[in-house]
Image (tube, helix red, strand yellow):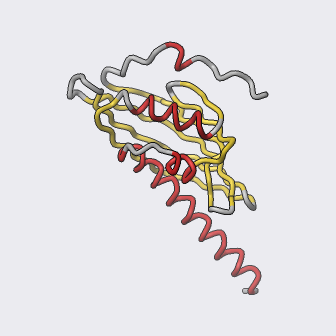
């Protein structure tokens, strides 16, 4: 095997490990509930687009605000990701996976609200490592009583300028 081919394989393995780590740390961070500027920079590009069950937002600051607001609907959560299919093309990557999320509503019943779905995440390599440039969570099913989400949260995002 050529040295150049071995180097490409090693880089591919290192990228996959870094991307898997980022995705795992992101889901864990949702349950740890510390959403500040450092959190947003650690996971997202400045121009990120995020499609969530409570609406679509653009920009790192908007993702931060939307995540804070959405996670405030719950007292406790556990987010699990699995089945990551990672496709790398140079400094860009696409990750498809499954997500199972268990939530206890804020100020409500202890009965859990559970959702399962598919994720699609686009990443770019930055000077600080891999970052999410676009993400979408498509909920396939739910069980239990969902939180009440204000209608204006789920309105489509305005077109990019």
Task: Name the spot of residue 33 as percent of width and height, x first.
Answer: 38, 43
Write down the quadrant of residue 68 in the picture. Answer: top left
Would you say 48 lies left or right of 98 here?
right
Would you say 145 lies left or right of 119 here?
left
Quadrant where the C terminus is found in the figure? top right
Write down the quadrant of residue 114 in the picture. Answer: top left
User: As displayed, is residue 154 above or below residue 84?
Assistant: above
Given residues 30 and 80, the one toward you in this image is 30
Q: Residue furthest left?
A: 110
Would you say 150 lies left or right of 106 here?
right
Please report the residue visible at 67 percent of the width from the left and 74 percent of the height from the top. Answer: 9
Please report the residue visible at 51 percent of the width from the left and 51 percent of the height from the top. Answer: 38
Quadrant where the N terminus is found in the figure? bottom right
Task: Name the spot of residue 84 as percent of width and height, x first.
Answer: 53, 52
Q: Residue furthest front?
A: 37
Task: Name the spot of residue 118 as percent of width and height, x first.
Answer: 52, 38
Would you say 69 lies left or right of 52 here?
left
Please report the residue visible at 75 percent of the width from the left and 28 percent of the height from the top. Answer: 160
Q: How many marks?
A: 0
Task: Name the spot of residue 142 as percent of width and height, x first.
Answer: 39, 26
Given residues 109 and 67, the one toward you in this image is 67
Please report the residue visible at 59 percent of the width from the left and 64 percent of the height from the top. Answer: 16
């Amino acid at each position: 095997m050529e040295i150049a081919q071995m180097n490409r394989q090693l880089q591919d393995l290192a990228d996959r490990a870094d991307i898997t780590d980022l995705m795992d740390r992101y889901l864990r961070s949702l349950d740890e509930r510390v959403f500040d500027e450092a959190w947003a920079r650690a996971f997202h590009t400045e121009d990120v687009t995020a499609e969530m069950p409570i609406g679509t937002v653009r920009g790192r600051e908007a993702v931060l605000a939307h995540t804070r607001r959405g996670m405030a609907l719950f007292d406790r959560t556990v987010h699990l990701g699995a089945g990551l299919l990672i496709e790398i093309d140079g400094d860009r990557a696409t990750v498809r996976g499954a997500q199972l999320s268990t939530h206890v509503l804020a100020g409500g019943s202890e009965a859990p609200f559970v959702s399962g779905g598919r994720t699609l995440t686009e990443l770019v390599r930055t000077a600080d490592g891999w970052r999410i440039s676009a993400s979408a969570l498509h909920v396939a099913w739910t069980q239990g009583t969902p939180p009440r989400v204000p209608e204006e949260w789920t309105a489509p995002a305005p077109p990019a300028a």
